[in-house]
Image: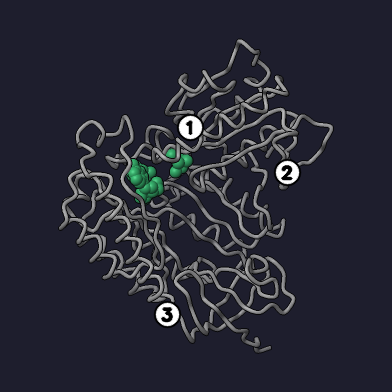
Amino acid sequence: MKHTDIKPITDPSRPQVYIETYGCQMNVNDSEVVLSILQDAGYALTENIEEATLILANTCSIRDNAEQRIWGRIDQFRLQKKTRPEVIIGILGCMAERLKEKLLEKVDLVAGPDSYRDLPQMLQAIRPDRPQINVLLSHEETYADISPVRLDKNGVSAFISIMRGCNNVCSYCVVPYTRGAERSRDPHTIVNEAKTLWKNGYKEVTLLGQNVDSYFWKDEHNSSNNTNFAQLLEMVAKIDPALRVRFSTSHPKDISDEVIYTMAMYDNICKHIHLPVQSGSSTMLEKMRRKYNREWYLERVRKIRSVIPDCGITTDVIAGFSGETEQDHQDTLSLMEQVVFDSAFMFAYSERPGTLASKRYPDDIPYELKTQRLNEIIELQGKMSFKSNFNEIGKQLTVLVEGPSKKNPDELCGRASNNKMCVFPSMGEKAGDYCTVEVVSVTSATLICKRVEEQL
Ligand code: SAH
Ligand code: SF4
Ligand code: F3S
């Protein structure tokens, strides 16, 4: 690893970089990699845009509204140039990759997700009439040797990207085009990164990939060292029983029994699976090219619950994909009622240029109908979240403290193993401590808990 600073350098004598991050957790981790590269090139982080000589946005293209937001931000960034013409504005991430030269009219630097090592050289080459762009995608880049500079605020929980890209071709999704082909990272570099975090006081790591179940490391010299995702999970879980391990995202077509049994074997592998279903209709799933159907999804949920009865299961749902009938929509609602997800991210379908769906399937569900269906989905999920939380009443849970609760500074908040947010009275613990609590009442978002005196 190039350097050992785990927290950002704040040094006013260095040139200052300001970074905004949009999109998924992988983008958050990428910003941490970018900061590491820029610190090595002499920059220091600022949270004040007015001090920054380099303004970066690490962007997301997943839905049109994500991109619209960035265009608005770019206009804001450009205001800084009015008084300080030397300011450099750069767009990183998925939108850089998708729009390429189109962004150069407005910014000085466009860098796709696999080009971050090139940033120092690009920054040096920028002149007022010479913006820089690198949007090459790679089959090898995993930034495995770069030690990310942690941008989280409380030093408890950190992300580790275990792979990049995606080899699936879900017909609605832009990610394979913005992130390129799937590649897995050497497991030893992952374990070393988790160990460094543990030594620096972190208590939780989240292993990230678009489809973690297809993680696979092939050892060129010795095939007995080949590593699949279940084996990687075990390697990280063995670092220390008090280090919590989470992961995201699981793909319903790929989540294996081996992963489920590995989770069950280790207390410190958190009992939560984010398993995006997208739709409850097998017709829609086929058109989405998810490569599973409703029955397959429900079977995976049954398997998870038979092995890990208390496992939290969360999901993503898309409303109003091409050709979605009222019956397809009802199938989504009935699946949600059947599964009772703990929580869900819910979206209206947004056609993305270049995807298979944009070429083959018209975006033919009117805006009002999409919104109405989305609202029905959101309303039902509210009830399901409450129902699933209500089932927790009376249970004892171990919570990793994140800090004071936002509403009441005399209370703490933190997550249980199943990823549910808990609030409870403080007894002076700090972020990173474990507490045992008992659930006394709930809302659809939070478990309200009392303290349980630990038996010594
Ligand atoms: N790799 C993950 C998802 C990554 S994108 C997986 O396969 O599940 C996160 C979520 O955004 C997706 O699960 C999907 O629900 C949503 N999404 C992706 N493309 C979308 C689109 N074109 N319109 C609306 N939502 C979309
Ligand atoms: Fe997109 Fe599908 Fe890959 Fe997820 S698995 S990132 S939805 S293509
Ligand atoms: Fe967005 Fe790219 Fe992540 S499109 S969701 S930032 S992989």
Check disc 2 and give the amino acid type: Pro
Circle 1 is placed at which residue position?
Answer: 140
- Contact? badges 1 and 2 (CB < 8 Å): no
What amino acid type is highlighted by mark number 1? Glu
Asked if the residues shown at circle 3 and circle 1 are in contact, with their CB atoms under 8 angstroms apart, the answer is: no
* Residue 199, placed above or below residue 287: below
The image quarter in which residue 109 lies: top right
Q: Nearer the viewer, residue 335 or 329?
A: 329
- Residue sitting at 56 percent across and 29 percent down? 75
Viewer-side label of 1, 2: 2
- Residue depicted at 71% across the width and 60% down the height: 201
Q: Residue at x 65, y 42 (%)?
A: 147
Left or right position of 455 against 235: right
- Labels 1 and 2: the sequence-earlier one: 2
Residue 164 can be seen, yes or no: no
Which quarter shows the C terminus?
bottom right
x and y, in percent, of residue 372 in the image: 28, 55
| Residue that badge 2 annotates | 8
Q: Residue furthest front?
A: 368
Give the colour scheme of this rendering: one colour
In percent of width and height, residue 331 lies at 20, 61
Q: Is residue 37 visible?
A: yes
| SS category of the residue bearing label 2 | loop
On the image, numbered disc 3 is attached to which residue?
A: 390
Disc 3 residue: CB within 8 Å of ligand 1: no
SS of the residue at dot 3? helix
Neighbor class of circle 3 (other Cα within 10 Å; few <14, some 14-19, many 20+) is some
> Can you give x and y, in whole percent of width and height, for residue 216 in the image?
42, 46
Sequence-wise, the earlier of marks 3 and 1 is 1
The front one of 102 and 125 is 102
